[in-house]
Image (cartoon, rainbow, N blue to C red):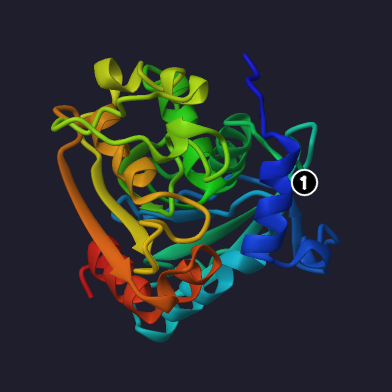
Amino acid sequence: MKRKILIPLFVVLAAIIGCGIYLKSSNFNTTADSVSTNKVKKRKLNNKVIPTFFFHGASSSYRAEEHMANAAVKAGAADQIIRANVFKNDKVTLIGKLRKNIKHPIIEVNYANNYSVNPDDVKAALVAVQNKYSYHKVNLVGHSMGNLLIAHYLNENYANKSLPQVQKVVSIAGHYNGWLGEGEEATSALKKNRQPIHEIPSFKTLLGLRKHYPKQIKVLNIYGDLQDGSRSDGSVAVSSAKSYKYLINGRAKSYREVEIKGKQAQHSWLHRNAQVDRLLIKFLWKK
């Protein structure tokens, strides 16, 4: 069942201004090496291969994922990057072909519907690559709204054994209890168990994770504090990002939080931050 959660207009505007990420660059044009997923034969990857999928934020594109992906390749942690373009009808076109000897591929996911939370975009991308390359395990990385896509995907598909099993999740600047400007909930203080004292309605839709967040998943939660007195990255309050722990506590195999501090902790800079690069490379690939 398709589930879409619309983001208020002012939030989209904030994302455009605050994130400022490549509105004109969400290029869905295919190239000569494009792969239509319903016209190719399936090729099975080595059982040890675990693809890592990157999901961008609102009003953004795959280009927001490129710095992190390229850093992983440069560090020798990942060895190839391809792209999955997800259209509004959940049709997926793959740009690039994975090499036969691939070990640590990255898939940059680019979705046309980049203004609302549609977990079917996650499912469509994972299934399209699965249909072509037959893999069984996967890692997921989200920035900003991309984290909500991942969270809702897990909330809705936890019992679906036909889907790849998620091993690790990296959450970067996740606004689980709202953006700044969405009311008092977005800056709500947290109880000792990280439950927000004031919960935004969309946070409540994720409470099911407390009962069925997959227990094999290891989680790294990265968020920013500009240290300007706002206790935020300029768009997401620290408390909103840290509320993720309440949703998955007692379920995730492991959970770690890392706070990035200073000017480089600004919301749109967190996916272009060398410290963040090192953290996710070590967490995902132990490099």
Front one among 50 and 21: 21
Residue type, numbered disc 1: Ala
Q: Is residue 259 above or below residue 184?
A: below
Crowd band around label 1 with a 10 angstrom C-alpha radius: few (<14), some (14–19), many (20+): some
Instruction: Report if residue 97 is visible in the image.
Output: no
Residue 61 as seen in the image, left or right of residue 165: right
Figure quadrant of residue 260: bottom left
The location of residue 173, given as percent across then percent down, is 43, 54
* Quadrant housing the C terminus: bottom left
Residue 106 as seen in the image, left or right of residue 181: left
Per the image, label 1 sits on a secondary structure element best described as loop
Q: Residue at horizontal 76%, vertical 67%?
A: 33
The location of residue 2, given as percent across then percent down, is 65, 19
* Quadrant housing the N terminus: top right
Figure quadrant of residue 233: bottom left
Front one among 150 and 174: 174
The location of residue 237, given as percent across then percent down, is 41, 49
Q: Residue at horizontal 50%, vertical 60%?
A: 234
Residue 180 as seen in the image, left or right of residue 231: right
Q: Residue at horizontal 20%, vertical 69%?
A: 286
Q: Is residue 193 above or below residue 234?
A: above
Q: Is residue 261 above or below residue 203?
A: below
Instruction: Report if residue 115 is visible in the image.
Output: yes
Q: Which residue is mark 1?
A: 112
Q: Residue at horizontal 41%, vertical 70%?
A: 265
Task: Tally the marks.
Answer: 1
Residue 231 as seen in the image, left or right of residue 33: left
Q: Is residue 228 above or below residue 158?
A: below
